Amino acid sequence: MRKEQHTKGWNEIKTNDSWAIFKIMGEFVNGFEKMSQIGPCVSIFGSARIRPGQPYYDLAVRISQKVAEAGYGIITGGGPGIMEAGNKGANMAGGTSVGLNIDLPFEQHDNPFIDDDKSLDFDYFFVRKVMFVKYSQGFVVMPGGFGTLDELFEAITLIQTHKIQKFPIILVGTEFWKGLLDWIKNTMLEAGNISPTDLDLIRLVDTEEEVVEIIDAFYRGHDLSPNF
């Protein structure tokens, strides 16, 4: 009897999984339709826990404002902290301000600086991540936590394995990122787990001017288009 109950439960899970495909497809279709109309954008990542008035929040505002003034839209995860700062800077510059929101049990709520017609909601992290990667002309990665690292290393992996076209990946904050980069160089590289050229996929800066210079320099030799 117990085995039959377990089997019944497993079959119910399989049925639910099959129907979930349609919800996943719906998120992809809605995301592709809206994002394809927005134009060239740069994504800004970072901690939801960094508050207004803190140095990295203010720096993120300046970076996004400068990037928007250079003609790029700004995409964030739509929530508070660095995401809010990114949308705020875009809003201040009169640029495109996109928020890709995710339904989470804590931390996440829409920030007020997203354009009304450019706020998208997702249930699935993997669908949301596709939108970031496909429609971003660059990643600006501010100090953050596990989610920020997830986005960072996924982008590096996809470029390293030639699954997507190369685009600028810019870490902002030498004090925050230096330890991680030292570990990558002194441990991963020394162990032979990455190639020396893989280090060229990442740039480390501290100012908004450097961010814009790197993005502009890259696109003097590359087309502005979706990444796959």
Image (spheres, rainbow, N blue to C red):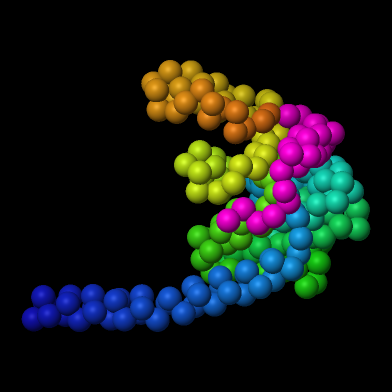
Please state the horizontal and vertical placement of residue 131, each as a whole percent of the image: 61, 60
Q: Which quarter of the figure is the C terminus placed in?
A: bottom right
Residue 201: in magenta span: no
Q: Position of residue 140 (x, y in %)?
A: 70, 42
Q: Quadrant of residue 197?
A: top right
Q: Residue at x 68, y 29 (%)?
A: 204
Left or right relative to 209: residue 10: left
Can you say whether 110 is above or below 177 in the image?
below
* Residue under the image location 77 percent in, 51 percent down: 86
Name which residue lies at 23% across and 75% down: 10
Q: Which residues are magenta?
A: 205-228
The residue at 62%/69% (across/down) is: 32
In the rendering, at what x and y percent does residue 107 appear? 62, 58
**Residue closer to the observer: 150 or 35:** 35
Occupied quadrant, residue 200: top right
Residue 181 in the figure: left or right of residue 71: left
